[in-house]
Amino acid sequence: MLLLLCALCVNALLISQATDVNATAMLQQENGLLENAQLLLLLACLATFAVHALYSDNPGGRLIALAGVLVSFTFIVRESDLRPFGLSAAITWFSDGEGRYVLLTPPWAGLLWVARRHYQPLRGRLTRLLFSPAGAALACSGLLLIAGILLDKSFIRLAPSRYYEELLELNGYVFLLLSALASGGRLVTDAPPASGA
């Protein structure tokens, strides 16, 4: 709840800056404040899902947590721009263009293969998770990220579009973190969730 309240306050501040061209240019720049905040949120998501995967005592919960780790890692790769750091071309290739596909395809294929083998325990756990507060936060995250994509691809026009795109992505990652935090008990243990959870 505190994270959501902080996010609302930060949003109010950032939206109030939308008419200031200098402020939006500084905030939305590549490797700028908004992108770095997104990366921090995604690292927190990855760590939270990884802890859930480590401590889960059931295959369905572990697979969902691992999917969360992979989603977080995929977005980290998408949001990262390693070129300004002077790393070798071989390393930066993995964070751009087709290198991303080479990096991300094997773990996703592996996860889908394992999920297919553990379909029954996964199905029940996933159904319970989707109709929970964690599932609602995940749905909000998805909607915000889709809206960001629509702004990025100019399907929606709203000036300054890059600024609002980054803001939508930031909020999408806040809700992804909320989903990760809220899903913990549902992923880690086979015990039924407490009422009102």
Image: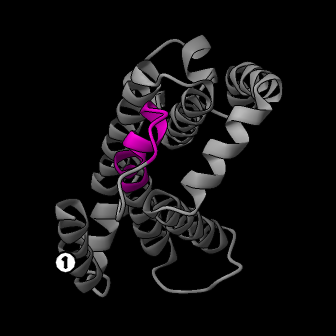
| Vertical placement of residue 157 versus 148, above or below | below
- Quadrant in which the C terminus is drawn: bottom left
Q: Using the image, determine if residue 9 lies above or below residue 159.
A: above
Say which residue appears at 43% left-offset and 47% top-offset.
183
Percent of width and height locating residue 119 = 79, 33
Magenta span main SS: helix
Residue holding disc 1: 13
Residue 138: image location, x then y, percent: 52, 59
Residue 120 screen position, x and y as percent: 77, 35
Q: Which residues are magenta?
A: 177-192
Answer with left or right where residue 52 lies relative to residue 152: left
Asked if residue 80 can be seen in this view, the reply is no
Q: In this image, 149 relative to 58: left or right? A: right
* Quadrant in the rendering for residue 51: top left
| The magenta stretch spans residue 186 | yes
Point out residue 97 in the picture as x, y percentages from the top left corner.
Answer: 71, 35
Residue at 48% across, 37% down: 187
Looking at the rendered structure, the secondary structure element under dot 1 is: helix
- Residue 136 horizontal side relative to residue 14, left or right: right
Viewed as shown, does residue 138 lie left or right of 25?
right
Q: Tag 1: residue type?
A: Leu
Nearer-the-camera pick, 37 or 162: 37
Tell me which residue sits at (69%, 33%) in the image. 121
